[in-house]
């Protein structure tokens, strides 16, 4: 049941991320006045709630942008993370939180709600320590901060769930580090959203730290066995070894699962500590538990799997971009001047309808593949993962439809005019920036398709790379174009 609307205005940061994207939808369902702060409004324009919220474009590092976004706001949700921006991510997160606290204070915000991570063990990782410090920096101002700390979040599309799912599916026998025996208290994404949603309607501002967790405490290995049972798999053989360091573990996870090494490492490091909610920090005194009770691990896994089976995944961990080189951190104009653009353009005309051809274009990638030269795409994905990239295994959120901002294997949807144009930006490790674009239109009663690969090389190395792979384009791109037409409905 939706909450009654009130006169409060809510700001959600991180609205293009996994939790933020779902929270905005929940608040909109409550008929709340919602504002979102995003770097690029185009990235969220295909969200079902986009037309129902106020969108502010800005940078979370800019005090002026933050003040503009926080003006007139009652409750501000802080859902920003910077773990993919290099080794100094903790310093970046600290500064961002300081700026947010200052801007919220100057704009007389009543409440800040922050989603952090449970960190009750003194042997905490850099990631968890940064999460704690972020909460402390947010609370350094005069605005009360309700910090909700969660452990592993189980839900369709979460990084923790994808790691669990793929490890269990692909490895009937596995050697694992000792941390798989550590205790954890996972929580369903539905319950996380329940607490965040209820925080919007607190009678008075609250300043405290609360742990939120599901109803069960169990080891990571037990959780894997539960997943195997629910998925109809045989019991997994788990052999613990003492030599797998967090670095080695994250490299292995990056190779076996869709979660890249850069994201797997903070997840693994977090599991080294026991992530169990502290009863002394219970959220119950602030927000009552759900009337129907908290969701247990088996039901949370079942719900997540059913969402995936129904192609009904609202948001994914990969909704946030994963820059892999300094010159790939933004899809806008590069920092160097006089940019060179190298292009490979192909065209074809067919009697198939524009609609049917477009449907084939929009289905590209994921389980549908890349319309030929499968082994070349597979090798390119392996090479990308070998050098720390995301590889091909991210797949896609929905098998048939795309929206701006979606990850698509090692691409991301940068521009989309449904029925006409699709532009993908490469998030693989490259000495430059690359795009792949499709344009479908009617010409003289026939359907004309343009397929163009473009590359902005970074220095001489980038130019050499382009000319080295150019012969492979002869196999990949003409075949792709022909098979797109062939797969289109008559």
Image (cartoon, rainbow, N blue to C red):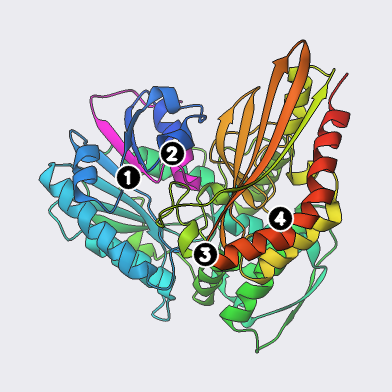
**Viewed as shown, does residue 330 lie left or right of 374?**
left
Q: Residue at x 58, y 68 (%)?
A: 461
The residue that disc 1 covers is: 77
Do callouts 1 and 4 mark residues in contact (Cβ within 8 Å)?
A: no
Residue 461, placed above or below residue 449: below
Q: Is residue 288 visible?
A: no
Image-quadrant location for residue 448: top right
Alpha-carbon distance for marks 3 and 1? Answer: 41 Å
Task: Say if the magenta span includes residue 18.
Answer: yes
What are the residue bounds of the magenta stretch?
Answer: 1-23
Task: Name the residue beneath numbered marker 3.
Answer: 459
N-terminal-most mark, 4 or 3: 4
Residue occupied by mark 4:
393
Queried whether the magenta region covers residue 101, the answer comes back as: no
Count residues near mark 4 (Cα–Cα under 10 Å), then give few for <14, some for 14-19, many for 20+: many
User: Measuring 65% from the left and 56% from the top, which residue is drawn there?
Assistant: 162
């Amino acid at each position: 049941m939706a909450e009654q609307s009130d006169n409060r205005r809510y700001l959600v940061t991180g609205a293009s991320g996994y939790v933020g994207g779902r929270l905005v939808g929940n608040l909109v369902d409550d008929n709340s006045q919602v504002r979102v702060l995003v770097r690029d409004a185009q990235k969220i324009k295909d969200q079902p709630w986009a037309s129902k919220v106020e969108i502010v474009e800005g940078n979370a590092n800019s005090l002026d942008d933050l003040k503009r976004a926080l003006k007139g706001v009652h409750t501000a949700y802080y859902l920003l993370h910077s773990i993919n921006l290099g080794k100094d991510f903790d310093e970046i997160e600290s500064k961002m939180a300081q700026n947010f606290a200052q801007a919220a204070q100057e704009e007389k915000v009543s409440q800040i709600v922050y989603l952090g991570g449970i960190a009750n063990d003194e042997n905490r990782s850099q990631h968890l320590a940064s999460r704690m410090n972020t909460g402390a920096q947010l609370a350094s101002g005069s605005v009360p901060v309700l910090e909700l700390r969660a452990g592993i979040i189980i839900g369709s599309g979460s990084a923790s769930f994808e790691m669990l799912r793929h490890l269990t599916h692909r490895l009937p026998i596995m050697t694992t580090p000792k941390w798989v025996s550590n205790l954890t208290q996972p929580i369903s994404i539905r319950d996380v959203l329940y607490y965040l949603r209820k925080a919007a309607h607190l009678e008075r501002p609250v300043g405290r730290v609360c742990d939120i967790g599901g109803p069960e405490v169990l080891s990571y290995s037990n959780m894997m066995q539960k997943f195997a049972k629910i998925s109809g798999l045989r019991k997994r053989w788990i052999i613990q070894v003492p030599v797998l360091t967090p670095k080695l573990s994250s490299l292995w996870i990056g190779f076996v699962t869709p979660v890249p090494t850069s994201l797997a490492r903070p997840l693994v490091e977090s599991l080294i500590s026991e992530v169990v909610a502290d009863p002394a920090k219970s959220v119950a005194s602030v927000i009552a538990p759900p009337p129907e009770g908290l969701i247990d691990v088996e039901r949370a896994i079942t719900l997540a799997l059913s969402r995936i089976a129904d192609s009904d995944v609202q948001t994914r961990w990969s909704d946030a971009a994963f820059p892999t080189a300094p010159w790939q951190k933004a899809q806008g104009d590069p920092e160097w001047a006089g940019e060179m653009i190298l292009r490979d353009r192909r065209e074809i005309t067919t009697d198939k309808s524009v609609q049917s051809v477009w449907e084939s274009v929009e289905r590209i990638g994921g389980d549908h593949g890349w319309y030929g030269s499968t082994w070349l795409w597979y090798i390119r994905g392996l090479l990308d993962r070998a050098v720390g990239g995301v590889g091909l295994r991210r797949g896609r959120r929905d098998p048939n439809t795309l929206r701006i901002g979606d990850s698509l294997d090692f691409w991301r949807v940068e521009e989309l005019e449904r029925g006409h144009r699709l532009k993908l930006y490469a998030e693989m490790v490259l000495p430059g920036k690359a795009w792949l674009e499709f344009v479908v239109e009617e010409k003289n009663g026939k359907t004309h398709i343009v397929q163009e690969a473009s590359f902005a090389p970074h220095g001489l190395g980038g130019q050499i790379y382009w000319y080295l792979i150019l012969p492979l384009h002869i196999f990949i791109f003409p075949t792709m174009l022909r098979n797109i037409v062939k797969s289109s409905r008559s």
